[in-house]
């Protein structure tokens, strides 16, 4: 979690640079934090884009009209203010991504959010452990560089290891 | 809003005339009215059909069996009796559309409806403004025709402009 | 009902033997019973698999990472303990099916369940009647075999006819 689905009418291809959208969405979600750390566990973020080959907008008269509909599902447990801030920001990202298309043609962009788990969720995910292992390896490498560096600069910060350690920490906070 | 998704098993193609279904669904929804005007804003109606290439029905023994599942999502705010009438009518339309397939083979048609906004909805849609602009242009053209016609027939009605003006009105009533 | 949707990243093909998954899921659901008979009506079980061609997992760094997300929707009316047992078993089946992929690569398997009918469900399904007719034919054939067999073995059981009769019975209990 979270899961993101981007449905788009196929007439937006290639104009809307859809290949760059999912990494951009994920990077945005990864960057979202509260004082206690990242909001979403890195290994739980999964986005997909689905092209629609058969659609009809309004009366169907405007063949150039297009739409994008984004569904976001997150696990329960985030407070409402945080969720709203995160989702508002995500929608701004989407508006910016599609601004040129929006300016040029009939265009409807919509986003809905929902919470998983109404009637149950099951998970089996080795990405957290893999990200953790990668983080540990990076931390070990950084510590080794630090130790070496310490011979010339005692105060060299360990900051290179921080992001992966953060990723491990948030995993504990939001088990997925 | 509303959003309609028609999932269908690919073995219904081409027999089920799926190319004609979405415009038919949209036309039905556009035509739904209460005393205060159209129920759905014209620029908010978006339908799509998704072919399923990989499916299994029951035990999988009957390769000719087929199914169609339709999901309808609408914004909150319509009363229950109106919604039921609209959805019952939509399901009758679907039954009629697939009647020949239903008569000929194993066939399961199902429809579910849900309300958007449980956990939030965001919208950015220029279709309303475009439809409005088209309506204004049509109204202006009709008024100009009217004005010309008025030289010979003072009471010539302005009715040509009514449908697009209605569309603009419902937009105000149901902002999307 | 139930409806099952298996979304999977296309990089799991062909390693994950997806062609065998849906029949396996359906067979599992068909086999689920309580003391009063099958839990799901045979003619209501519909599964589909949808390949995702465009996805992004976490930061997108690991191109070999994969995910599978399974959505299960059932009609209301089963008790919670039964549902949990059935869904737990289904998730075990999924874990077993994807075990080799899980062992080999970054892999996230998730399943969510929901109940149909929050805002309405419509159904039109001839599969029940067809399955019933097939069951009746099978029962008649079995009875005829039985009757013949009875000339040599009076106590020959009618068990060959039992599964389809069960299917007819559950249809009455859970009209779909």
Image (spheres, coloured by chain):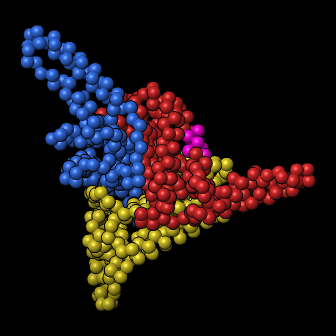
Chain colours: A blue, B yellow, C red
x and y percentages locating residue A157 in the rendered image: 12, 21
Q: Is residue C74 above or below residue B166?
A: above
Q: Residue at x 54, y 38 (%)?
A: C18
Residue C87 in the figure: left or right of residue C34: left
Residue situated in front as seen by the camera: A126 or B153:
A126
Q: Is residue C154 above or below residue C108?
A: below
Residue B4 in the figure: left or right of residue A158: right
Residue situated in front as seen by the camera: C141 or B86:
C141
x and y percentages locating residue C95 in the rendered image: 48, 36
The residue at the far right in this view is C151
Residue C21 falls inside the magenta stretch: yes
Residue situated in front as seen by the camera: B162 or B47:
B47
Q: Residue at x 27, y 36 (%)?
A: A172
Question: Is residue B12 visible to us here?
Answer: no
Q: Total number of numbered labels? A: 0
x and y percentages locating residue B72 in the rendered image: 43, 62
User: For the N terminus of chain A, which image quadrant?
Assistant: top left
Prevailing secondary structure of the magenta residues: helix
Q: Is residue A105 above or below residue A169?
A: below
User: For the C terminus of chain A, which image quadrant?
Assistant: top left
Q: Residue at x 60, y 50 (%)?
A: C30
Q: Residue at x 33, y 67 (%)?
A: B76
Question: Is residue C24 visible to us here?
Answer: yes
Q: Place residue B2 in its image quadrant.
A: bottom left
x and y percentages locating residue C106 in the rendered image: 40, 30
Q: Is residue A173 above or below residue C129?
A: above
Highlighted range, magenta: C20-27
């Amino acid at each position: 979690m979270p899961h993101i689905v981007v449905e788009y009418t196929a007439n937006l291809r290639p104009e809307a640079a859809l290949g760059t959208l999912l990494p951009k969405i994920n990077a945005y979600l990864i960057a979202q934090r509260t004082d206690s750390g990242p909001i979403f566990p890195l290994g739980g973020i999964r986005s997909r884009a689905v092209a629609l080959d058969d659609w009809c907008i309004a009366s169907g008269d405007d063949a150039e009209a297009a739409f994008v509909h984004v569904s976001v599902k997150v696990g329960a447990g985030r407070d409402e203010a945080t969720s709203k801030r995160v989702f508002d920001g995500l929608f701004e990202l989407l508006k910016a991504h599609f601004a040129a298309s929006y300016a040029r043609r009939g265009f409807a962009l919509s986003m809905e959010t929902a919470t998983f788990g109404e009637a149950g969720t099951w998970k089996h995910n080795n990405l957290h452990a893999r990200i953790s292992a990668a983080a540990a390896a990076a931390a070990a490498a950084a510590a080794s560089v630090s130790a070496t560096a310490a011979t010339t600069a005692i105060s060299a910060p360990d900051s290179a290891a921080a992001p992966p350690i953060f990723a491990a920490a948030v995993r504990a906070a939001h088990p997925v």
